[in-house]
Image: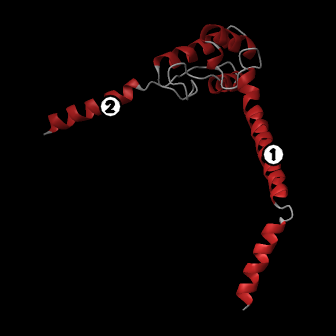
Amino acid sequence: MRLASAVLLALSCTSVAHAAIDAYTFKDDAERARYAELTRELRCPKCQNQDIADSNAPIAADLRKEIYRMLGEGQSNQQIIDFMVDRYGEFVRYKPGLNAHTWLLWFGPAGLLLGGMLLIGVIVARRRHTRTEEADVLSDEERRRLAHLLDKKTE
């Protein structure tokens, strides 16, 4: 019984051993804050919707190690981000910069909103115009018919 319990406990602990936690030592709190900021700002290329700080993917661990190495070399945040963008493309950034490849990403939603408002304005203006045309005075034949119908109801 004890042997079975020990085996079960050992098997359950192996999954925890795979989820390694990065244990880096930093020169000061400012460098630790820069590391935390960079790992939260960069997206995991494999997970796609997780930053590399939260991802357990092997590539995210490699990227965290690379950031730590570059911080140790004294590189600036922008140099590290530029390195990652050169290596993995603009996708690796949660907030991509404005350039020829990303202008649609930045201005597309505003353009769609303005286009939708313009379309609604045109539709409303056309409907108002057709209602005023339809609300013109009745023809003589329509007036006689209306008078005849109204006379029948009052009788």
- Front residue of 57/133: it is 133
* SS for dot 1: helix
Among the two numbered marks 1 and 2 on one chain, the one whose residue lies closer to the N terminus: 2
Residue 147, image x, y percentages: 79, 78
Q: Quadrant of the N terminus?
A: top left
Which color scheme is applied? secondary structure
Of the residues shown, which amino acid type is indicated by label 2?
A: Cys
- Front residue of 84/53: it is 84
State whether residue 8 is above or below residue 125. Answer: above
State whether residue 45 is above or below residue 83. Answer: below
Between the C-alphas of marks 1 and 2, the distance is: 63 Å
* Outermost bottom residue: 155
- Crowd band around label 1 with a 10 angstrom C-alpha radius: few (<14), some (14–19), many (20+): few
State whether residue 131 is above or below residue 22. Answer: below
Identity of the residue drawn at 77% across and 32% down:
111
In the picture, the disc for residue 13 is 2
Q: Answer with left or right where residue 154 lies relative to residue 7.
A: right
- Front residue of 61/119: it is 119
- Residue 141 sits in quarter: bottom right
Q: Read off the residue under disc 1.
A: 121
* Outermost left residue: 1
Residue 76 visible in the snapshot: no
* SS for dot 2: helix
Of the residues shown, which amino acid type is indicated by label 1?
A: Gly
State whether residue 8 is above or below residue 38. Answer: below
Residue 137 visible in the snapshot: yes
In the picture, the disc for residue 43 is none
Report the number of discs. Answer: 2
